[in-house]
Structures are given as structure tokens and as C-alpha cells.
Image (cartoon, rainbow, N blue to C red):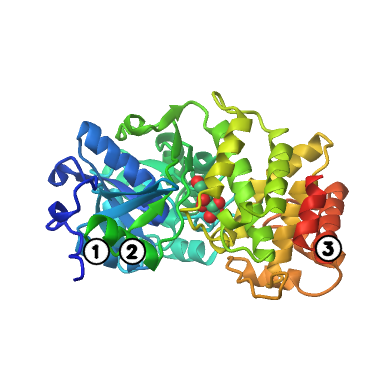
Amino acid sequence: MTAPRLSAGTLARAAPGVRRPQYDRTKLRPRIVHLGLGAFFRAHGALYTDDVLGARGGDWGIIGVSLRHPDQRDRLAPQDGLYTTLQQSPAGIEARVVGSLLGVLVASEDPAAVVARLASPQTALVSLTVTEKGYCHQPATGRLDADHPDIRHDLAHPEAPRSAIGFLVAGLARRRADGVPPFTVLCCDNLPRNGALLAGLVQDFAACRDGGLAEWIAGHVAFPATMVDRIVPATTPADIAAAAQATGLHDAAPVVHEPFAQWVIGETFGPLGRPAWDVAGAQFVADVAPFEHAKLRLLNAAHSALAWLGLLAGHASVAQAIADPDLDRFTASLWREITAVLPPPPGMVLGDYTAALRTRFANPAIHHRLAQIAMDSSQKLPQRLLSTIGERLRQDLPIPCLALAVAGWIGHLGGADETGRPIALSDPLADALRRAAAGGAPREIVGRVLALAAVFAPALAGDARFVGAVTGAFERLRRDGVHAAARAAAG
Ligand code: CS2
């Protein structure tokens, strides 16, 4: 017999022991608008909010916005916004139904409805997980890419935008005109100094529309920084079956996540407040930067390095890659190279942090595909690896593991693993990357790739130590293969 569909009407029929909203959902109001309703936010920010509602009550409901595709809305609307989270660890699965999401808007279908929601006085907070490329910026400089097709479109059609930046500015412009206090903007993507970065992009965009608006935003809108962390692989058909098995209800949009979660948030919020996320374990701090550096430069850097080298070696998931003894040793050495130039955030011991990361990566219950992590790597490389490389070079320290990671990225652009099986490339710069990586001696390929100014700042691309280390690592990778190159780099 097929399980009934999860919805407000069937929730009471969920299997006993499945945690469900312990609060009255009819009391929730749309006070948070979340742009980019992917799996990550539903297993992170929405879950923290659900925890707060369970512990303290309140009315902090969420409207999710999918910028492009209707899929999430089509899956979640028949479920009244309810969905299942599956926490997966070696000890087993824990299923829970989350109630903080009130509804989903699809921006590409009805941009005016999204602008109206952003402009509504009920909206106190706008959070974002639109992925690195969703910010339409130059990763190497952190500045708005004024030539980006979506930015050009949004400047021409400010009331019917496509980009997250265009929506934020449209909503803020309307509020300013209506005399409504601004919402706080909470960037939850893995970008360096994400609050300040987004503030700069929004102001740059607003300045192209109206100098007074840009000034008002600079003076009135809070953009706290955040560090977000939880490993959330893309949902698979097997996860949908596992959710039905655990709850007895069919959920078309469950999310799977690891037990670990961390959320560090800057203290400066606007006048309309925020949920008491600290009740759910979030940390509010004066300076997020040390936490963000540690996370991006250790967790995300190792993720990306394992993705590129692991794909070349024929692995499919993070757990498989870290179970490969050569890649495991390489990762440990990479972390040593990084921690040597990384100030520890208050209260954190970096050696303990990396030991915990290794356990998280090895979680056999989480099938985190390397191909998912390798997506959009041109947008990830600067903050994950290049900033540490710059720091080590400033201190005149060698970079064997970091250079091999960059060489792995260049290697995987070639489009095939060591046995000749194809590696797909999904990246906003895919065409330029493919051209740069095609044909010629390793030295020529490295030269063409490092000349991509959107990724590599000129000072780094022109540093002979960097060019030499990456070229040497890439030559070795080509000649001796991933395993030998990883052993050589690990020393
Ligand atoms: C990953 C991240 O896909 C990726 O690039 O490195 O999504 C990672 O899983 C999260 O940042 C963990 O918090």
C-alpha cells in the first residue's frame, strides 16, 4: 500500500517517535523570506527556526523563494510546506517533520509577488543561500560583475528582477519609498566576509539605479556575517523511500543531513529583530571572520581538494575518497599546511576541529557526491584555497599540498578520470575553463588557467613560487597519477 502524502491533514498519522512541530503553525506569520530554497537551508536555518518555535513559540514563519525552478514549490505546496529531515549517522536514521516553512514562491513565474513579499512590513529578515555563483560577482575581487547577464537584465527591469541582488534592491527601494523600516539581510553562503561582501554588491547595484537609494542602504540596512555548517547531500530517490519508511508518510521533498550543525552569526541586526536562534544553539559573536576562515579554509578547502583529486582517482563520494589511504594522508598534511597560518577562532582548537572533520567526512551513512562539491569550483577556489596560499607565500612557506589541490582542479577540467571515464564540468565559466585546459604541455595548460583573472588575482598568478609549485604538481599528477602525487605532496 502506498503511504499517504505528508500534509497538515495527515501529520497526526506519522509514525510514533517521529518528532513533529510542537507549536501552533496557524500562529506563524511570514516574517522571514529565504532566497534560494535548497536542501541546505531546509536542513539548517529552517531547522534552527523550527527548534526556536518549539522551545519558545513565537510567529517567525518562513516564505521560501526559488529563484528559477518550480520543483520545490511543486513538491512542498501539496504538503503545506511540511517536510521531513533525516539525520543520518552510523547509529541510524532520525526522522523529523519540520513546520517553519509556510510557503514557496517561484520568482521566475511571478517576480512581482516576490518583490511585494520583500516590501511587506511583515518581512523582518531576508536570508539567502543562493550558492556562490548566485551573487553575480567576480570571485577574485568580490566586486559586482556589471556584465553579468542577470545584472544587466535587472538594471533594465528593476521591478521584475532575476538575480538575488536585483530582488534585494527592489524590495529595499519599495520599503524606502513606503517609509517601512528595512529588513535585515542575512547571507548564509560560503563566501568570505559574506555580510560585507553582499552589502557591497547590493550597494554597487543600487548605485547604478539611484545614488540616494545606495546611500540609504549603506546607512540603514544591516548585513550581519554568518558562518554556516552542515553537510547536506542532494536528495535522492532512495532518501524519499527512506523518509516514507521512517515516517509512514510519503514526502516528495525530504532532506538528509549529518548530525553536526554550526551557525555563527554577527550581532548587528536591523530594527525588526530576529528569532532567538541562540536558543537552538546558534552563536552570536562580534566578529564572525575567524570562524568563517576556519570553516572555509579547512572544511570547504578539503572538500574541494578531495572532490577534484577523488574524481580523478575514480571515487564517487567524500566517504570513499577519505577512505583512500593516500588521500586521507594527503588531507591530513593539507590541513597542517593550512592550520600553520590560520589563527584559531575563540574557543576552538584547530587540531580537534580537523579531527572532527575527518570523522564527519568518513560518515558512511552520508553519500555526499564529489561531483556535487566539484560544481561551480571556479567560484569556490579563491576563498577555499587561494587565500591560504597567499598567506603562506607571504610568510615564504612552501605549498606542496595546496598546489596539488589546485593542480587537481586543473586536472579535473580535462574532463576524464585516470581510467578515461568522463568527469562532467558544471561551472559558470565552463567554456573558458575547458578552452584553457585543452591541449599542450602541462606548463602551457597551467599558464592558460592561471591567466583567468576572474579566479586568480594578478599578484598571485604572477608569483613565480605559485606558478612553479602548481606546474610541478600538475606535471607529477599527469605523469605519476593521483596516488603517487598525493603521497609526494604529503611528504
Ligand atoms: C561543499 C559544501 O558543495 C560544497 O562545495 O563543500 O556544501 C559543504 O558541504 C558545506 O559548506 C558544509 O557546511
Give the residue type at disc 2.
Answer: Ile
Work out which quarter of the rendered image holds the C terminus and state it. top right
| Residue at the disc numbered 3 | 480
Q: CA distance from mark 1 to mark 2?
A: 8 Å
Which comes before the other along the chain, label 1 or label 3?
A: 1
Give the residue type at disc 1.
Answer: His
Is label 3's Cβ within 8 Å of ligand 1? no
Q: Nearer the viewer, residue 309 or 315?
A: 315
Q: Is residue 5 left or right of residue 32?
A: left
Q: What is the quadrant of residue 282 in the picture?
A: top left
Work out which quarter of the rendered image holds the N terminus and state it. bottom left
Q: Secondary structure at mark 3?
A: helix
| Residue at the disc numbered 1 | 250
Which comes before the other along the chain, label 2 or label 3?
A: 2
Q: What is the quadrant of residue 292 in the picture?
A: top right
Q: Is residue 279 left or right of residue 3?
A: right
Q: Are marks 2 and 3 in contact (CB under 8 Å)?
A: no
Q: Is residue 33 visible?
A: yes
Disc count in the image? 3
Give the residue type at disc 3.
Answer: Asp
**Residue at the image point whose x is 43% and y is 30% from the top:** 283
Q: Is residue 3 left or right of residue 433?
A: left
Q: Are marks 1 and 2 in contact (CB under 8 Å)?
A: yes
**Residue at the image point whose x is 86% and y is 70% from the top:** 441
Q: Which mark is residue 240?
A: 2
Q: Position of residue 90 (x, y in %)?
A: 45, 47
